[in-house]
Amino acid sequence: MRLRQLENFIAVCNLGSISQAAERMHVAQPALGLQVRGLEDEMGVQLLERHARGVRPTQAGLLVADWATETISSTNALKQKLRAAASDMTGSVTLGLTPSLATAFALPVLHEVQHEMPNLRLHLTEALGHLLRDWVKAGRVDLALVFDGPGGTSAGTNKLLTESLYFVTAQGSPLAKSGTIDLTEALEHPLAIAGAGDSLRAAVEHAAKSLDLPLNVEYEIQSVNVILKLVRNGLASTILPIPMVLEHLRAGDLVARRIESPALTRDLRWLTTDKAAPATAALQGLVERVLHNQRNDPLLNEAYEMALVV
């Protein structure tokens, strides 16, 4: 049970509609329905009853909604106390982010650190996952967010979020359709993609191997900017996370289709040094809140499924 799940349930009770609550809380309606059913299973009672105009809480549902409201209120009060304590923290922490995470979240993280932890000296570094792992092990980076290796190899502590990967092509291409794309179809087309050693390339290779399909790599390029130029000019397609193409999607020159059947995803986990300072733990909590809040962007909300963030 997560606080987000309780917040969503309260919204359903207040609005009397799962669809309206889903829109208000920026979550897919089927996912919200599953959350409610999961909460009912956990509590062992029916929490909602359906009627012609929507839903209403049962007597048990009203009790759970009251308890959830108190739980969220007390948790928020605790968070405020922790943030006040964090504002007094001093020292220096080096945070490592992968390129896709840095693109989407570096600026809001820096802004929140300046606001909530003004006495902390934050050093932010961007690098590929395998480099961040080495740097954490060597003590050069105190805290890092890295994606699992191929096959879901655990990289650190419990999963923080799951990132969906997308098939990206030029606007105007025959492949530039709405909706999702099957992984088998995505792998049929010539791709511009990073070379060996890149975690995203490894994830795509692993998925292709699991389906016993060849990987059709037309251009092997380490630069995302060059890859996107090739894609915009219709010379190839690519597979990338949403943050790497966010501005192009908003500009309308690229189209991204989420890969499904099976889904192509990566799990994000924390890596920390063996002797993490108190400021490191406080920074970790702040980063988790930023990742949670940034999902209010509809594109990021679709691309990231939160796991442990509350």
Image (tube, rainbow, N blue to C red):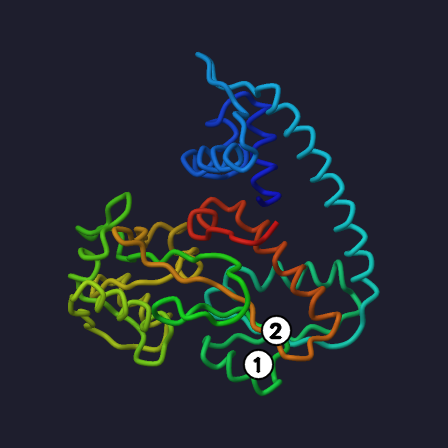
Q: Which residue is drawn at 60% across and 25% down?
A: 61
Query: Residue 244 location in percent, x, y?
Result: 42, 62
Foreground pick, 2 / 309 = 2
Residue highlighted by disc 1: 136
186 vs 22, left or right, is left
Q: Which amino acid does label 2 sit on?
A: Leu
195 vs 10, left or right, is left
Labels 1 & 2 near each other (Cβ < 8 A): yes
Mark 2 lies on a secondary structure that is strand
Badge 2 local density, few (<14 within 10 Å), some, or many (20+)? many
Q: Residue 143 carries which label?
A: 2
Q: Which residue is drawn at 52% across and 53% down?
A: 307
Foreground pick, 177 / 186 = 186
Query: Residue 113 location in percent, x, y?
Result: 70, 63
* Marked residue nearer the N-terminal end (1 or 2): 1
Residue 138, compared with residue 241, is above or below; it is below
Disc 1 to disc 2, how far (Cα)? Answer: 7 Å
Q: Which residue is drawn at 58% across and 64% down?
A: 106
Badge 1 local density, few (<14 within 10 Å), some, or many (20+)? many
Mark 1 lies on a secondary structure that is helix
Q: Residue 240 carries which label?
A: none
232 vs 32, left or right, is left
Q: Which residue is drawn at 44% across and 12% down?
A: 52
Residue 251, compared with residue 277, is above or below; it is above
